[in-house]
Amino acid sequence: MFPLSDRAKASLNQGAAFAKWLVYSCLVGVIVGLVGVAFHLGIDLAAELRLEHPWIIWFLPLGGAAIVLLYRACGMEKDRGTNLVLVAVRDAERLKLRTAPLIFLSTILTHLVGGSAGREGAALQLGGSLSAHIGKKLHLDEKDERIIVMCGMAAAFSALFGTPLTAALFAMEVVTVGRMYYAALVPCLLSSITALLTAQGFELHSLVGYPVPDALPPTPPLILQAAVLGVLCAILSILFCVVTHAAPKLYAKYLPDPVLRGLAGGALVLGLTWLVGSQTYNGAGDPVIRQLLAGETIPLAFALKILFTALTLGAGFRGGEIVPVLFTGCAFGTWMGPILGLPHAFSGALGMAATFCGATNCPLSSILLAFELFGGTGLPLYALCCGVSFMLSGYYGLYSEQKIIYSKFKPEWVDKKAK
């Protein structure tokens, strides 16, 4: 037999790596996709029960205390949530399997009693911990474990939100802004698409996206208006991050006991709900987003959603921040956009994408999110609005373990953690 050349050996190794990730990625997509379906259905059921029986919201204080006690009983009282998943990808820190059932149950409970939280941030923890356990069982090395955790993040995001391209890129982009692990591109895409197909097998995401009938292609006036809205969304995203990061510190300062924080936080959200007179700001808020895009305007709704979300998550309730960010951006956009001269629904969609971008520091994911949620009409304006928001949102972000390694103004290394 003739010895193989170095080039032939490299080709065989590449082929073997591709085949390996083809199997592993689809495996993660199916497993995490099935859990994601159960998670999606559980949250929907919890939200429906609360809408059918509004008195359930009176259990908010008990719900907050119960979640804290649940994490304490499982030895996870100091759990860092999504931040730990980011560290697992960047620094190969171990994720505990118990994270998955804990975030699963506690997020559903948060939605049941009316806490203001989303589901996609929780999905990152769910998918990350499950895929990390799969990687451990497969005896993957440290570098491959990072990729499989990203696969789990992408799969869970896709199964819950129905946006496979955004999910795959977000899992790669959110960890370290300015540097992506391109080796994870195909595995993340395969996991994301497989998870979406799994969810669609259970008749989820048959209709994905939001109707934006008044989206427009770029013109000189619209370019200026979209850029101005991007500036304002950058400020809004900073406000969202500052308030949500300040809330747990204030709770800890005045209420050192985590159980009391859960009780007090639930009572505060309950009191605010009573003052508002409706449950508009409880839960994730997807129905309200659709009402806003359909033509409704609620002045200062963005400020109330920030307050509700900060009080909820800061007290120890569990869930995600992404849908509340989208709610905040949509409410702000539909209020401010028409003042700037933008069409109502289009300005709400621009506000959603740009605020998401400023809060997550993920411009490419935000542009793909706009495409998958709103369609291709006006995509250059979505991209511009997102780009301006990204550039001017500074080094603030939803996740304190996120690293921004390149300046947003110059091609130079800064290596800062998000504030």
Image (cartoon, rainbow, N blue to C red):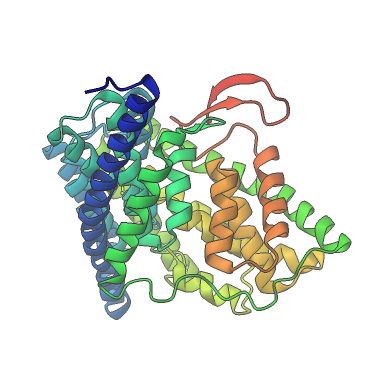
Q: Is residue 313 above or below residue 42?
A: above
Tell me if residue 319 can be seen: no
Residue found 38% across the figure and 38% down from its top: 251
> Which image quarter: residue 13?
top left
What residue sits 64% from the left and 59% below the top?
Answer: 351
Q: Residue at x 74, y 72 (%)?
A: 343
Query: How many numbered marks have been drawn onto this rendered protein structure?
Result: 0
Q: Residue 290, image x and y in percent?
A: 52, 74
Residue 212 image-quadrant placement: bottom right
Q: Residue at x 40, y 38 (%)?
A: 184
Query: Does 168 sit left or right of 13 as displayed?
Result: right
> Which of the 4 quarters of the picture holds residue 30?
bottom left
The quarter of the rendered structure image containing the N terminus is top left
Q: Residue furthest right?
A: 220
Report x, y in % for residue 23. 23, 47
Q: Which one is in front, 213 or 352?
A: 213
Q: Nearer the viewer, residue 283 or 377?
A: 377
Q: Position of residue 41 (x, y in %)?
A: 25, 68
Q: Nearer the viewer, residue 317 or 205?
A: 205
Residue 121 against residue 60 in the figure, above or below = above
* Residue 96 appears in the picture as rendered: yes
Nearest to the observer: residue 160 or residue 347: 160
Residue 92 at x, y = what percent? 31, 25
